[in-house]
Image: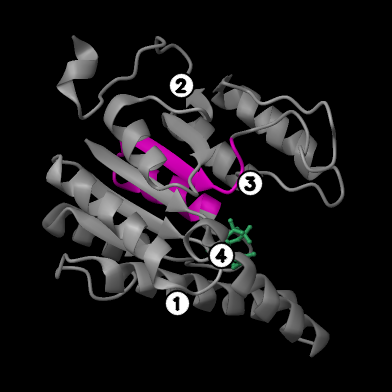
Amino acid sequence: MNVVVSIGGSVLVPEPGADRVAAHARVVEQLLEDGCRVGAVVGGGGVAREYIGAARTLGANEIELDQLGIDVTRLNARLLIAALEEETVTAPARDYEEAGDAFRTGNVCVMGGVAPAQTTDAVGAALAEYVDADLLVYATSVPGVYSADPNEVDDATKYDHLTAAELVEVIAGLEMTAGASSPVDLLAAKIIQRSGMRTIVLDGTDPERIARAVRTGEHDGTDVVPEGSGDEPTAWTRDDHDE
Ligand code: UTP
């Protein structure tokens, strides 16, 4: 099973520290042991926001700020690489081809951001599309996709299940509300829609939830299911789920 896990910077590195990164690396290794090929995409989180905030005050333009953000995502990706026992990955892949090569030859690749004017949400979706992933998992700091920003709106409801078209609609609505944040951005949602990628958005602060979702399909987040496919997942790594 080919799986891409997009780990938010605020999930992997709420502050630079070893334990949480090591726990996420263990999950990547467990999935490799299960026989998965794993692509991990790492976000910039609070550290990126602090750098971007400081540089904006200093007069940097938006593209320069994006480059700064990309550098922080790659820094976080290097932390994950440092925690992996795999010796095949030595640096974050710079583009999809490099990531795809590592994925096919060593069964694992790690990336941060790649190009300005997007976030690692889109990188995760594009990598998943590029390596023909069976499953894309967004490990975020929120429990799933909501009808509105749950930090702002009391009666925001979490979706257990969405089609990709519904995901695009929900995210587009969220992005039009100033200040509201969505767990997956619109470009990522559009890539998911065009590729028909089975996707899970979950709270990844406990990395074991990622392992469980990949292995069994069980999670408390939001399932984004390609149109036309049934409720049952196409492939989970644990056979006992199929029995
Ligand atoms: P993130 O993907 O971390 O953005 O990239 P985020 O929305 O803050 O997500 P969390 O908090 O980690 O979940 C950080 C910044 O890096 C730049 C953007 O400026 C983004 O806001 N970036 C990242 C790019 O320009 N291109 C990329 O491919 C990735």
Labels 3 and 4: the sequence-earlier one:
4
Q: Mark 4 and mark 1: span between their CA atoms?
A: 14 Å
Q: Relative to 93, is 194 on the left or the right?
A: right
Query: Residue under circle 3?
Result: 185
Identity, as a three-letter code, of the amino acid under mark 4: Pro
Residue type indicated by callout 2: Pro
| Image quadrant occupied by the N terminus | top left
Is residue 27 visible in the rendered structure shown here?
A: yes
| Residue 27, position as x, y percentages in the image | 29, 50
- What distance separates the C-alpha of mark 2 from that of mark 1? 33 Å
Question: Is the Cβ of the residue at disc 4 closer than 8 Å to that at disc 1?
Answer: no
Discs 2, 1 touching: Cβ within 8 Å: no
Horizontal and vertical percent position of residue 96:
35, 59
Instruction: Give the mark nearest the N terminus, 2 or 3.
Output: 3
- Report the residue marked by disc 2: 226
Helix, strand or loop status at disc 4: loop
Of the numbered discs in the image, which one, if any, rests on residue 75?
1
Q: Is residue 143 left or right of residue 146?
A: left
Looking at the picture, tell me which residue is in the foreground, 180 or 228: 180
